[in-house]
Image (cartoon, rainbow, N blue to C red):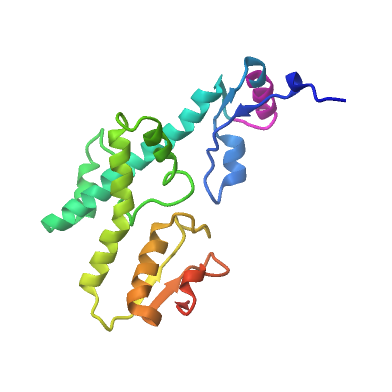
Amino acid sequence: AGVDLSQIHMAYCPERVLPGKIMTELVENDRVVGGLTPAATHAVSGFYRTFVRGAVLETDAKTAEMCKLTENSFRDVNIAFANEMSIVADTMGLDVWEVIRLANRHPRVNILSPGPGVGGHCIAVDPWFIVDAAPAEARLIRTAREVNDSKPHHVVAQVLAAAGKDAVVACLGLAFKANIDDFRESPARLVAVTLARKYGARIKVVEPYASELPREFEGTSAE
């Protein structure tokens, strides 16, 4: 017997979970459900409501997918601002942490902490889908991606400027964020491997959450 396609409901539900808290956030977070048809939206929303304690918000599939890309692009732009400010502060001889600490005393300012870039399989990737779909319009989103993609190179330059040619350098953490073992798109990984090419065995890599290091670190000391 053939399959009755009218009984197959397909919908898009953006994932909004934090690594390390996946099961908790899977249940507690609000969810957006967008079906290919109104019937699919209704059916899939009903399924999510059987275990989601947050709100289940219904829309169409295209809007749900754009919602996911928008969420991650928003985060990328905000991170890019902090990362760009850290580069500007370095150029001007200022302590970016002090600048941000004081600026955040403004009641409507909440600047994030700068870092070595942006990693992971969502924030570092999703904005490019918007840029590809609307290249002439997504100017800020593209620039934010370029700022965050360039930040690891700035970090490497800082290390090379501070360390002598015979330095022993410790890279504390390789994952794309704290307390996980996920190396995907990790800026720390890029920084460490770039330094390893220069310093070889004098690079000491520390990643306590990983059972083994990526293969490009073969021959590198892992503590």
Rendering coords of residue 132 (x, y %): 39, 35
Rendering coords of residue 37 (x, y %): 62, 18
Rendering coords of residue 176 (x, y %): 44, 56
Rendering coords of residue 33 (x, y %): 58, 26
Q: Nearer the viewer, residue 65 or 51?
A: 65
Quadrant where the N terminus sits is top right
Main secondary structure type of the part rendered in magenta: helix
Residue 108 lies left or right of residue 43; in this view the side is left
Residue at the spot x=39%, y=62% of the render? 190
Q: Which residues are magenta?
A: 41-53
Position of 144 relative to 194 (above/below) = above
Q: Which residue appears farthest toward the front when viewing the image?
A: 2
Q: Is residue 158 magenta?
A: no
Residue at the spot x=43%, y=73% of the render? 205
Residue at the spot x=46%, y=29% of the render? 66
Q: Can residue 34 be seen in this snapshot?
A: yes
Q: Which residue appears farthest toward the bottom when viewing the image?
A: 166
Residue at the spot x=47%, y=29% of the render? 67
Q: Nearer the viewer, residue 93 or 186?
A: 186
Q: Nearer the viewer, residue 39 or 131?
A: 131
Residue 102 lies left or right of residue 137; in this view the side is left
Position of 61 relative to 183 (above/below) = above
Position of 101 relative to 53 (above/below) = below
Q: Which residue appears farthest toward the right when viewing the image?
A: 1
Q: Which residue appears farthest toward the top when viewing the image?
A: 38
Q: Nearer the viewer, residue 4 or 89?
A: 4
